[in-house]
Amino acid sequence: MTVSLRQSAEDLFADELTALATNDERDRPPNWKLSPQAVVTYLMGGKAGDGTPITPKYVGNRRLIETAVATLATDRALLLLGVPGTAKSWVSEHLAAAVSGSSRRLIQCTAGTDENQIRYGWNYAQLLAKGPSREALVPTPLMRAMEDGTIVRLEELTRMGSDVQDTLITVLSEKTLPIPELNSAVDARRGFNVIATANSRDKGVNELSSALKRRFNVVVLPLPASIEEETSIVVKRVQEIGTSLSLPKIAPADKEIARIVMLFRELRDGQTLNGKMKLKTVTGSLSTAEAISVGVSAWAEAGHFGAGRVDASSLAANLVGAVVKDPVQDTVALQEYLENVVRTRWSDLYTAIREVL
């Protein structure tokens, strides 16, 4: 049997979704697989009605997830906003999986995204042979979601041009997709909605028009409030990803992951955790997602080339690769941090990073 490199949320957590659906006696909005309360339980963790444990998919403010789920139960679209690494895409995927049973209706927005990728396209062989017809129409994930009454996800909404963004206005306000070539339209079934994500650091690149902004309810996902919370997130995700990739078994790496998180937070905030020393900041975001990536990469290196445990040597190159995005500015910031903080705090890590730089 072929094993996918990355399973979708609805496949990876199929047992939890089934347990929640089977024991969910609360009212469900039209075409929803779960009640709003069960969707929140799926995201935040808890137990299904039969006692099946539900693992938390998002570690953070429960109220934010409740607001997001309540929005999807209305006729307003949901925009998840935040800096890189705040789990916007992760939350979007799991919301779609819990509400519609599928997270695969996805449009990745880029500078090259055009209207045909948002609204619909054409099979040009059919179009030339028979002219405009429904058979010649190529539906997009958005059109399919409207026809079936499900969730469609738009990733990095502000990455595509403002003129293309505005093609969503009629869909979000009127819940209809005009097809002028056929003198018809696709009317959305109940249950249809849109979850979009946007990076708050992209503001001004392709900023949303005021007309489009009004169609979204915005939920801002913050960075983890405390180092303990962020460390627990990184430890959990590193374990899940490493296991799914069948990486070699190694000794628990919680302490090493805690070092990654502390280093990232201090360089991100421009000061040590106790606030006693100011630091140069780096150009990268040093997000939670990047900390997870460093942890997984260090695990792979330790498992395949190391002594079966994550140590300073397996961390060093991966940390430098994550921190140094600008060869000049970031290298200066990292070297200052090494000399003023790391040398006295973690001598082994200081030596290992110095060998890489």
Image (cartoon, rainbow, N blue to C red):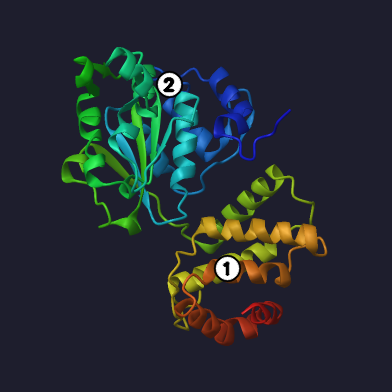
Q: Quadrant of the C terminus?
A: bottom right
10 Å crowding of disc 2: few (<14), some (14-19), many (20+): many
First in residue order: circle 1 vs circle 2 = 2
68, above or below 102, in the image = below
Q: Which amino acid is tagged 1?
A: Gly
Can you see residue 134?
yes
Name, please, the residue furthest toward the right. 307
Is 145 on the left or on the right of 45, as rendered? left
Q: Which amino acid is tagged 2?
A: Trp
Quadrant of the rendered image containing residue 182: top left
- Going 64% across and 59% down the picture, which residue do you hit? 295
**Residue 119 in the image, given as x and y percentages of width and height:** 30, 29
Question: Which one is in front in this view, the residue at disc 1 or the one at disc 2?
Answer: 1
**Residue 305 in the image, given as x and y percentages of width and height:** 79, 62
Q: Which mark is residue 32?
A: 2
Quadrant of the rendered image containing residue 322: bottom right
**Residue 237 in the image, given as x and y percentages of width and height:** 61, 49
The residue that label 1 is drawn on is: 321
